[in-house]
Amino acid sequence: MQRSLVARNPSILIFLAVLALFTLGVTILSEGFGIGLISTSFVKTLGKTLALALVAVAMDLIWGYCGILSLGHFAFFGLGGYMIGMWLMYERTRLIVAESLANAPLPPTPAEVEAAIGQQIFGVVGSSEFPTIWVFAHSLPLQLMLVVAVPGLLALVFGWLAFRSRVTGVYLSILTQAMTLALALYLFQNDSGLRGNNGLSGLQNIPHLDSVPQSVLSVWLFWASALALALGYVFAAWIVSGKFGSVIRGIRDNEARVRFLGYSVEGYKLALFTVTAMMAGIAGALYYPQAGIINPAEVAPIASIYLAVWVAIGGRGRLYGAVIGAVFVSLVSTWFTGGQAPDINLGFYTISWVDWWTILLGLSFVAVTLFAPKGIGGLFDLLAGLRGPDRHGADLGPDQGSLREKEAQE
């Protein structure tokens, strides 16, 4: 009998319950809908953290379950932010231009309005004409489609080229990092069509919602991030709980054997790489309206390395571990880099956590790798009493060539 998704992955109900309680608690304590104990800026921080947790789930799918250490998924995250940012900036500028030209002696022509919008957006890079990539910027539905289409298409093309060549291991990681670096360098150019180093700004001002205070708007975006994380988690759990999940875990553990069994290893890799890129794009589209700005530095290779660190600290191969790692590191990073952590005066030297946080994060990653490879999520396994099967060296299958306990632990 086919068991239900919840029966195959009981962590789903626990995760959804915790997320629902967390969302309700933040709403009650917020300034927009509650008693005001949580500031609007911190609500935005929590909303951004949930968006980062969603991209961490995507990273865990591709790395923790399929064994592909992608150092390019934050590039897909950034592309999703750029796609929604184009509409936000265009529509907000259009409304401002229309209001300023409303009192002109003669009504402006559509061409004049378009030229004025272009001047406002691209004047900072010495241009006033819309690049081709902004052709759909006037349409929210089309830009929302591009949020998943652009990262998905880039992942599809890149993955097809890489996987058909059977590039694996560290070489594939280097290729994904090179892709990210190339994209960042392109976006830094003024003629990229996305305002170069200036990026897209003012994204927190949602068009047509000027009358809605930021305290309320921040809670709405927080709800959207929570809903997206809930759906993304259930979707990821559905993937790993079925046959597809068994195959990608097999690819992670022994790719040659899975290929020998007749499965299209490259096809499974490509499908998962593309889907997780789309998930990352959705997460980016939720993150940057809460951040208010996006620039090419956001898609630099170091950001994707941080993403891998989050998943490793949380515990890769566990969806809830990826969420825990992203939330924990994000909030601790905000505390250290926001000047809230007190400096430590050693007499001969003062430790400023704003400068030392990245070093502390790197040491934490090394410590987890050496002493707690299961990450923070492994603690939940201990609390729940989850252990591997104690087979005392017995075969794990009907033939003597099956995997043994010693091999399973390596």
Image: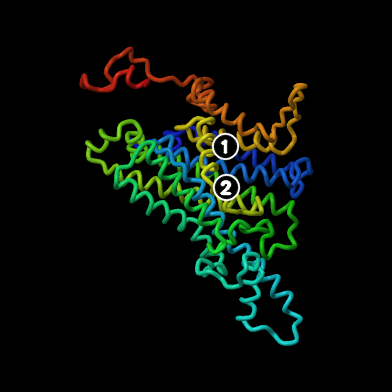
Residue situated furthest top in the rendering: 392
The answer to which image quadrant residue 239 occupies is: top left
Who comes first in sequence, dot 1 or dot 2? 2
* Residue extending furthest toward the bottom: 106
Quadrant (top left, top right, bottom left, bottom right) of the C terminus: top left
Residue 233 in percent (x, y) is at 50, 41
Look at the picture and state if 82 lies above or below 19. Answer: below
Position of residue 26 measured from the top left corner of the image (x, y, whole percent): 69, 41
Residue 134 versus residue 57 in the image, above or below: below
- In terms of depth relative to the viewer, which is nearer, 219 or 101? 101
Who's the residue at 22% across and 21% down the image? 401
Q: Is residue 215 above or below residue 304?
A: below
Nearest the viewer among 146 and 241 is 146
Q: Which amino acid does label 1 sit on?
A: Ala
Q: Quadrant of residue 340?
A: top right
Residue 21's disc is: none
Q: Which residue is drawn at 68% across and 70% down?
A: 95
C-alpha gap between disc 1 and disc 2:
17 Å
Residue indicated by mark 1: 326
- Secondary structure state at the residue bearing disc 2: helix
Task: Please identify, in this view, whether the residue under mark 1 or under mark 2 is nearer the observer.
Answer: 1
